[in-house]
Image (cartoon, rainbow, N blue to C red):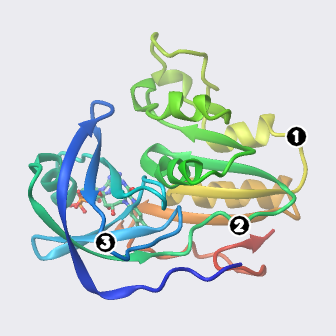
Amino acid sequence: MSSMHPIRREPHHVEVTGRRWISEHVFEITLTRPEGFSFRAGQSIRVRCMETERAYCLVSSPEDPFLALCILHLPQGKVSSYLAAIEPGSVIEFTGPHGDFAFIPSTREKVFVATGIGIVPFVSMVRSGVRDFMMVHGVSSPQELYYEDFFEKNGVKFVQCVPQASFQEGGKQSPFPGSVTDYLARELPRGEYDFYLSGDEAMVLDVYSVVDDLFLGSRVYSEIFFSRSMGQWQNRKPPVAAEGSGPTGRVR
Ligand SMILES: Cc1cc2nc3c(=O)[nH]c(=O)nc-3n(C[C@H](O)[C@H](O)[C@H](O)COP(=O)(O)OP(=O)(O)OC[C@H]3O[C@@H](n4cnc5c(N)ncnc54)[C@H](O)[C@@H]3O)c2cc1C
């Protein structure tokens, strides 16, 4: 595996160049790209404001001349609310790139699994040219299915998982009526895969269990955005034993 780009300790200062809402609660924000700043698709930056900082994965491609973030606006959230209201021309401070969640080529079939806004690193991976994977996206309502067209346009098999109880008319196609773990357990043919997981901690831990039970020999890479038990997760890794090689890969 090639090494990650080194973390620059001094913060960068960049200008906000635009903001675009892609669903009722999710927006993309574009930033100028500091000279010499490089990253791998899947990595994040830490935005500093109001004496705190929050991690956000880059949604742009490493080749783009600008940087872009995609953010879920939490009405009670300190930083996401600040960024949801920020005006073009404002300057924000960040450090990075951070993290080691990145695509690692292999001969196995790849299954990317995201809940909610956890889909962001996979968008960057597609923008950087990664193909030949299945995308399984779990959301609580069809309104949260942003980037559906993007994945389909790029020829990625896209499975939407929406619990039946919250399904409403209006979706383009029938989603799988259950969680992403239900989908993997019931629909994915048994075999050895590379699973890439991104989203909330509960999903990541559930998928680890399903892989342990049903997909032995598979490798799992994960990025946790949020832990309900601990509030802000801040880049911690799931509390499971690591046996495999690679930065975040576990052979199950
Ligand atoms: C490596 C990494 C990458 C991340 N990438 C992204 C990204 O690309 N896009 C993105 O939108 N977020 C991302 N996050 C989450 C982000 O760092 C913040 O946690 C999130 O924006 C909330 O911050 P806030 O200051 O607005 O809310 P806070 O003020 O921290 O929290 C307000 C309330 O909301 C709860 N809360 C916090 N996060 C969530 C959540 N996700 N779902 C439900 N409730 C929550 C808190 O427990 C608290 O009760 C990432 C996190 C990590 C660790």
Badge 3: residue crowd in 10 Å (few <14, some 14–19, many ≥20): some
Check disc 2 and give the amino acid type: Ile
Up-down: is 181 above or below 140? below
- Tell me which image quadrant ligand 1 sits in: bottom left
Residue pointed to by mark 1: 189
User: Decide: marks 1, 2 in contact (CB < 8 A)?
Assistant: no
Question: Could you tell me which residue is drawn at 63 percent across and 51 percent down?
Answer: 129
Where in the figure is residue 6, as x and y percent of width and height? 47, 86
Residue pointed to by mark 2: 104
Question: Could you tell me which residue is drawn at 43 percent across and 33 percent down?
Answer: 146
Is 195 placed left or right of 233 in the picture? right
Question: Could you tell me which residue is drawn at 46 percent across and 23 percent down?
Answer: 166
Q: Is mark 3 within 8 Å of ligand 1?
A: no
Number of numbered discs on residues: 3
Up-down: is 94 above or below 57? below
Q: CA distance from mark 3 to mark 2?
A: 23 Å
Q: Quadrant of residue 248?
A: bottom right
Is 185 placed left or right of 149 in the picture? right
Check disc 3 and give the amino acid type: Arg
Pair 1/3: label in front: 3
Local secondary structure at mark 2: loop
